[in-house]
Image (tube, helix red, strand yellow):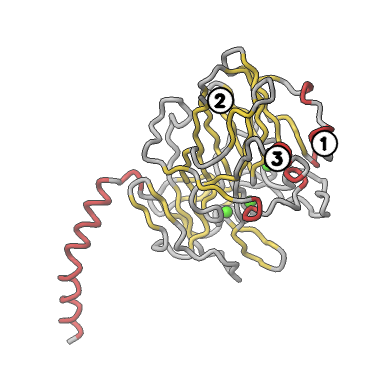
Amino acid sequence: MKNRMMRFNIILAAPFILAACTHQTAHQSEQPSFTQGLAERYHSDVYECRKVDSGGVPPRVTNDGKIISEDGIEWIVPAKVDYEGSTKASDLFNVCNDVIPLSSADVNMADFPVHDAGGSDVFTAYVFGDNYFEFTVNDKITVVDPLPFTPFNSSVIKFKAERPFNLAVKAVDWEEYSGLGMETFGKAKYHAGDGGIVIVIKDASGKIVSVTDDSWKAQTFYIAPLATKSCLVVTGADRNSLGCPMEDVKDGSQHYAAHWPIPQDWKKADFDDSAWSYATEYTNEEISVFNKPAFSNFTDIFDDVKGDASFIWSSNVVLDNIVLLRKTVK
Ligand SMILES: [Ca+2]
Ligand SMILES: [Ca+2]
Ligand SMILES: [Ca+2]
């Protein structure tokens, strides 16, 4: 009886299995590699800050890790970054460097260096990222977040360019448990932290020329933690983890992570991002930034009534941990 039932189920399922295989072949490059468990240490102390933030919270240690996926590929987690040796963004607010202005009125914008992305117009970008970003203009200059994990900081990037220019931003939600996308948080030993980034760009006259919103393109390349592999739904270029559990767990050490390779040419203006989704907008409340002075001391910039920037990310601001963002500023 049992065997007959099984055979019956297989016959019923056959067309669906066939359909799934055909689908997978058509979008093979979009299927992730999976890893399970903690990565081994790659670099210890990518960055170290000994200062506590204004809430008395000690900084988290910034490590990264490497881990081999089930299909034999080595992945650097949370992301392979160009931190060391790269040009760092200027500090708008950075406890670790003792740059702690109470408002934008206390910041001398004329002091910041100007990076040359081609062209003669000067633009100023203001960035707050949870937790790390690499900001590329016209694939010509890349300026990186000086503080990869915590405390939370904010940055200024002044650059010369000509409109239209292309922005390519790699945004990384850093992690304490390398390869698992989790951190200790209060009483929770395994907590999936969130990401989010907000950017405002002004021209030399102070006029806002671009803010982060849902006109930006966004794609995720690293999703963790995954309680199961099957909760992740990949349909073409769409990588949807919204059906996966996100609650704190007692032991996340055996959770999975999904990885995709980052296209070589993704920073180029003519890179085809047509299959990518538009970014999802998140509110200040969703990202919980009112207790973070690197953001809340500068709401005149980030929440300007003349152009209120939204936090953006891919569809899952908790589980998606590497998000590439693209925008052409006209
Ligand atoms: Ca940061
Ligand atoms: Ca985070
Ligand atoms: Ca996360």
Q: Are marks 1 and 2 in contact (CB under 8 Å)?
A: no
Amino acid type, residue under disc 3 in the picture: Leu
Q: Which mark is residue 137?
A: 2
- Please report the residue visible at 83 percent of the width from the left and 54 percent of the height from the top: 56
Q: Does label 3 point to a residue whose CB lies under 8 Å from ligand 1?
A: yes
Residue furthest to the top: 120
Residue furthest to the front: 306
Q: Are marks 2 and 3 in contact (CB under 8 Å)?
A: no
1 or 2: tag closer to the N-terminus: 1
Residue 311 appears in the figure: yes
Residue 46 appears in the figure: no
- Please report the residue visible at 41 percent of the width from the left and 25 percent of the height from the top: 270
Amino acid type, residue under disc 2 in the picture: Val
Is 241 positioned to the left or the right of 53 in the image? left
2 or 3: tag closer to the N-terminus: 2
Instruction: Determine the CA span between mark 1 and mark 2.
Output: 25 Å
3 or 1: tag closer to the N-terminus: 1
**Element at badge 3?**
loop
Q: Which residue is mark 1?
A: 99
Instruction: Determine the CA span between mark 3 and mark 1.
Output: 13 Å
Residue furthest to the bottom: 1
Q: Which residue is mark 3?
A: 147
